[in-house]
Image (tube, rainbow, N blue to C red):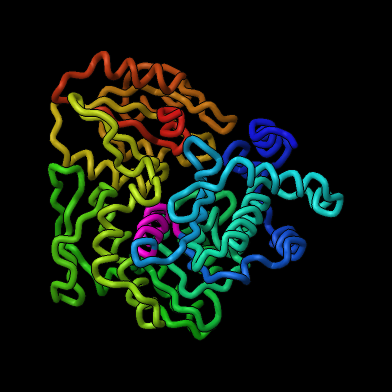
Amino acid sequence: MISYKHTLDFLYTHLPMYQRTGPAAYKNTLDNTLALDKFFGFPHQQFKTIHIAGTNGKGSSSHLLASVLQEAGYTVGLYTSPHLIDFRERIKINGKMISEDQVVAFINQFRQSTELRQLEPSFFEITVAMAFDHFRNQQVDVAIVEVGLGGRLDSTNIIRPEVSLITNISFDHTALLGNSIEKIATEKAGIIKPNVPIVISESNDSYNAIFESAAHQKQSPIYFADQEFQADYCLFLPEGKQLFNFKKTGELTFPDLKMDLLGNYQRKNAAGVLKIIELLTAQGWIIEMSAIYEGFSKAAKNTGLKGRWEVVGNNPLMVCDTAHNEAGLKAVVSQIEATPWKNLHVVLGMVNDKNLDLVLSILPQKATYFFTQAKIPRALPAADLASQAAAFGLHGQVIPSVPEAVAKAQSIANAQDLIFIGGSTFVVADYFS
């Protein structure tokens, strides 16, 4: 049997991988996914699922919900992407990653099958098949399944979930999903299944009607979570958590709800998760109030989620966040503005298929930048990023290595300063690796 390292080499170099190479790895059909599912005995039919899509917030929402259900006593599978450090982060059960041996065994099975190799599947298609096979073999009660890209044609979209969640819609992956909010929303709405409740975390006049129409056609109940659950403010606690008081239609329902996922924007994700919990409870799931509070308070601890306004150092304060598009970075900039600091230092890197003008125009000019690039083929060269950023009044140094850029920022920053690391999931990944 080949080693885990050689298995990863095969996955990364022999299969088309969107995270590394971009649109060339994207498949516009579910044929391969259906063929893989059939070959492995339709594993996704052997456990319950919850499907989560959206432009931003689907990762936080997936981990938050998984934590609550885990605290409620369920065996919970969690499939997410991309990973930060270890491929196995994508496939977890109750916070425990799939083992190296299990990854190797699955890929060996694939490589030994002429039928499967002839499909020429993508990295993502194989990974989804691996996750569903693992969840079936380990007999999970439920799997939280995060969409990889879009929704309608995403490899995860063969499941029939108990409930679906769409967090929000904004501009990202426009080359594949469309160059308008309406087109992107239509792709995300593709996860809506007949007679399956759909929750929208963040309502918006630009896409509400699209989701309502899709839900009506499928005879699926639709709920806009932010129209029911609201938290007016958050309070950061010395223990490294934040506290919300959530009201439902004006009545205080979840007072002093602590979260270890930081960032004021988490209130939007929390609203969607609270609505899903309500719907699951109505379906007969046993989810005590204590499980909700514990699940929210220990979401990162229970699931291993990283990179969401994550504090990685103090004096100076160092924070990383995986936000990488206009809407996500707007939320991050708002959080930066709400955080006390004397001087701001930004370690910034991006991939080469983003609309830079939209992103660079919202970043703070009153900061020292360290333009960098992640170690992936899609990374925008640091010098190119610096050149384009200058047109928006963003200036600093070009340091292509992420660790060296962070070290340089640390050498300059004072104890009262803030160092932010982000712009791309892969920049954060390089920081942690």
Magenta: main secondary structure equals: helix
Q: Nearer the viewer, residue 140 or 411?
A: 140
Question: What range is drawn magenta here?
Answer: 54-69
Q: Is residue 366 visible?
A: no
User: From the image, which quarter does the N terminus lie in?
Assistant: top right
Above or below, comparing residue 332 to residue 231 in the picture: above
- On screen, residue 279 versus residue 339, left or right, reads right
**x%, y% of residue 132?**
61, 59
Q: Can residue 411 be seen in this view?
A: yes
Q: In which quarter of the image is residue 408?
A: top left
Extreme residue toward the right, this view = 114
**x%, y% of residue 126?**
68, 50
- The residue positioned 47% from the left and 38% from the top of the image is 84
Q: Which of 81 and 106 is in front in this view?
A: 106
Above or below, comparing residue 232 to residue 350 in the picture: below
- The residue positioned 15% from the left and 30% from the top of the image is 341
- The residue positioned 51% from the left and 29% from the top of the image is 380
- The residue positioned 60% from the left and 55% from the top of the image is 131
